[in-house]
């Protein structure tokens, strides 16, 4: 990976245009289209938008100058170009027409209207600013591109208020040279699109709109259908506002410059996006920044169309983490029987068994079907997202920061993936379907509200490097730098594999975490290879018993784990009360379970508690958690006194013995017996 793409997220000033609540902008913010016969008003002043991203400092913005915002023109000074069938008539200076080809060679305003059935518009005005006003223009080329911007300082395309405009290129170009245009609207210069009209683009050969420099969309309605990519900007794609609808056989929106420092970013300040792409919906060759906007993205036909396979290998330990030898099997609580060899093999078909795996996937540009993708950092500061992707819904080859917004994600692979670091500081994330929910080498959750449904691990901390078998009692690789940190926010996980899976360690000091974990004994609601230091917040984890783990002995906050003699039905209410009869926590796991771990700041050593099942609770249940609501009609299962250690293990007879690694070390780095989650053996830098 290019080092420049590595986590600029937390320190660097980047060329981006993020405009969020509470942040100032000098932009006038209003784009008014001038009437055809009237002089325009003064152009809006140049602007530079910025955003304060959750304490990470102000990120400098893309600069919008006066030309980017100017939509006005005057009939007295503009050159009129009337399109008529296979010919065009030019009234004014700076342009000429010949056999359906209109060539513009000077700076100025050019107003196009009418229909050109076979021809094209060419701009060749080195270092000049050219303003094209599409005032009800329909341009079709049967031999190449519809608008070819060969050379200019900048070209502004204004969509006149109240008009519908159309550009259509040929399916096969007569010019097959290396320098031939690749889009219906093709520019080698900076290209800005503004105005309030509508532009339909049919890219029959390759792309819809392409700029080999910067591409800025200030406003307007764009409807793009492209054989390959919808919108392409080599050095920059910046969207300030607008209504964009894209259907593409390749990527929806993309930048391509992955070699020049400071180039290749995609920046979205706002707008509405409806993108249906065969490949990635939005793909940045560098970093991707989103401040606001409404996004409906379907990539690769959606998660149900995913052809992603997760090839797994299973060294040692037997299926489901049990069987051969003593690798990674900690001491179960007294009175609890470890499943016999091979017992872990009976697994519900909808749930994956994590066997310390290495996932081997190979992706190419043609197979990547992600929602949001960046080779560099990916920042979401706001906006509303509906993303349905055959591949990852949100993906970065560097870091992901989510500090705001509402994200509804369905993924055929990871819902949110970052190679280096994933940070959730705010916003609402609802992952309705995924293979793994959150995945990165470092995951930090300090705010926001996150819900995860995953067929495998809900949260997976892994660097994808693979690794060897772990030792006894959770001792795989404690100092490998892989870390899950939870200091705030709300996290609810429904996992077919491990609920929280760290191939390193876990630190929790605040927030609320609810885990409805696996029903098979080859996974656990909690799975870590190093340590789990728990000092604050509320942690509720329900799941199977075979590989169950609890926080480490060094944890400052007390926990209790109840191990039932047999699995309890989904929805069975479990209530923990103190010696005064007050509810400490009430939970009705949404899946069958045999263990429940409860840890809240209210748990105190030396205090007596009772645990009961059944009945009804008057609290407002959220993800199966009723908080401290009052339970009635329940049946007491056990009474016990919380011990001095970090974790008190309880069965129906009272306090029993156990350790924080019931399920054992379960492998380091994703290759030990029954644990560690999957790792990707190879990451393609641009996928």
Image: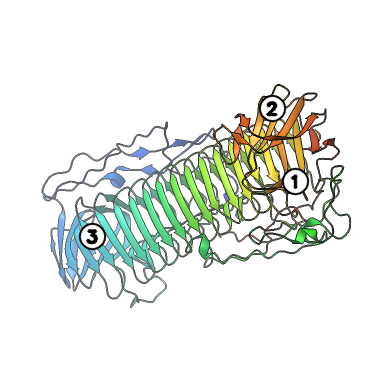
| Residue ranking furthest to the front | 633
Report x, y in % for residue 388. 48, 56
27 lies above or below 85: above
- Mark 1, residues whose alpha carbon is within 10 Å: few (<14), some, or many (≥20)? many
Dot 3 or dot 1, earlier in sequence: 3
Identify the coloring.
rainbow
N-term-proximal mark, 2 vs 3: 3
Residue 238 seen anywhere in this rendered image of the structure: yes
Judge left or right: residue 574 versus residue 447.
Answer: right
Q: Which residue is mark 1?
A: 528
Question: Which of the two residues, 605 or 116, is positioned nearer the viewer here?
Answer: 605
Residue 614 image position (x, y, % from top left)? 66, 39
The residue tagged 3 is 165
For the N terminus, the image quarter is: bottom right
Residue 105 can be seen, yes or no: no
Between tags 3 and 1, which lies in front? 1
Mark drawn on residue 601: 2
Q: Secondary structure at mark 2?
A: loop
């Amino acid at each position: 990976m290019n080092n420049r793409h590595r986590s600029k997220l937390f320190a660097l000033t980047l060329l981006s245009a993020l405009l969020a609540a509470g942040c100032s902008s000098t932009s006038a913010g209003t784009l008014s289209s001038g009437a055809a016969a009237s002089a325009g008003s003064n152009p809006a002043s140049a602007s530079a938008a910025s955003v304060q991203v959750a304490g990470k400092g102000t990120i400098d913005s893309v600069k919008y100058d006066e030309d980017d915002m100017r939509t006005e023109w005057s009939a007295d000074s503009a050159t009129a170009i009337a399109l008529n069938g296979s010919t065009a008539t030019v009234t004014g200076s700076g342009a000429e027409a010949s056999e359906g080809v209109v060539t513009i060679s000077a700076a100025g305003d050019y107003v196009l209207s009418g229909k050109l059935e076979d021809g094209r518009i060419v701009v060749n005005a080195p270092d000049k600013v050219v303003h094209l006003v599409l005032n009800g223009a329909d341009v079709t080329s049967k031999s190449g591109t519809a608008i070819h911007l060969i050379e200019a300082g900048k070209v502004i395309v204004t969509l006149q208020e109240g008009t519908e405009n159309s550009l259509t290129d040929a399916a096969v170009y007569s010019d097959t040279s290396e320098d031939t245009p690749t889009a219906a609207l093709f520019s080698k210069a900076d290209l800005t699109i503004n105005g309030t009209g509508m532009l339909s683009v049919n890219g029959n050969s390759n792309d819809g709109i392409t700029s080999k420099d910067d591409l800025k969309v200030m406003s307007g309605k764009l409807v793009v259908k492209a054989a390959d990519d919808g919108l392409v900007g080599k050095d920059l794609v910046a969207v300030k506002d607008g209504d964009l609808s894209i259907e593409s056989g390749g990527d929806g929106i993309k930048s391509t410059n992955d070699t020049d420092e400071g180039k290749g970013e995609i920046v979205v300040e706002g707008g509405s996006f409806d993108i249906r792409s065969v490949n990635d919906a939005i793909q940045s060759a560098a970093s991707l920044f989103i401040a606001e906007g409404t996004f409906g993205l379907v990539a690769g036909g959606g998660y149900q169309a995913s052809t992603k396979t997760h090839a797994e290998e299973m060294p040692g330990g037997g299926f489901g983490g049990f069987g051969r030898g003593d690798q990674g099997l900690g001491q179960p609580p007294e009175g609890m029987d470890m499943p016999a060899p091979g017992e872990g093999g009976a697994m519900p078909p909808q749930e994956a068994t994590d066997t310390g795996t290495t996932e081997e996937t190979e992706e190419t540009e043609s197979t990547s079907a992600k929602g949001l993708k960046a080779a560099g950092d990916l920042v979401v500061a706001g906006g509303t997202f509906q993303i349905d992707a055959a591949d990852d819904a949100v993906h970065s080859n560097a870091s992901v920061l989510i500090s705001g917004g509402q994200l509804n994600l369905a993924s055929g692979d990871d819902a949110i993936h970052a190679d280096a670091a994933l940070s959730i500081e705010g916003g609402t994330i609802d992952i309705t379907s995924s293979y793994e929910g959150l995945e990165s080498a470092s995951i930090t959750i300090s705010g926001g509200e996150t819900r995860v449904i995953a067929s495998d691990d809900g949260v997976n901390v892994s660097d994808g490097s693979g690794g060897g078998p772990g030792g006894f009692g959770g001792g795989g690789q404690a100092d490998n730098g892989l870390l899950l940190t939870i200091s705030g926010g709300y996290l609810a996980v429904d996992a077919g594999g491990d609920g929280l899976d760290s191939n390193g360690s876990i630190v929790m000091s605040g927030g609320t975490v609810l885990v409805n974990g696996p029903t098979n004994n080859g996974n656990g609601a909690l799975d870590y290879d190093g340590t789990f230091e728990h000092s604050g917040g509320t942690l509720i984890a329900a799941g199977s018993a075979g590989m169950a783990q609890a926080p480490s002995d060094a944890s400052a906050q007390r926990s209790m784990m109840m191990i039932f003699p047999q699995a309890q039905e989904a929805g069975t209410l479990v209530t923990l009360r103190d010696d005064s009869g007050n509810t400490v926590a009430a939970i009705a796991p949404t899946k069958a379970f045999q263990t429940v771990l409860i840890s809240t700041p209210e748990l105190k050593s030396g205090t007596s508690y009772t645990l009961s099942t059944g009945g009804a609770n008057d609290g407002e249940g959220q993800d199966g958690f009723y908080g401290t609501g009052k339970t009635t009609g329940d049946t007491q299962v056990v009474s016990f006194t919380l011990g001095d250690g970090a974790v008190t293990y309880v069965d129906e007879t009272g306090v029993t013995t156990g350790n924080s690694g019931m399920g054992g070390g379960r492998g380091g780095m994703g290759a030990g017996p029954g644990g560690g989650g999957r790792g990707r053996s190879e990451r393609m830098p641009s996928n």
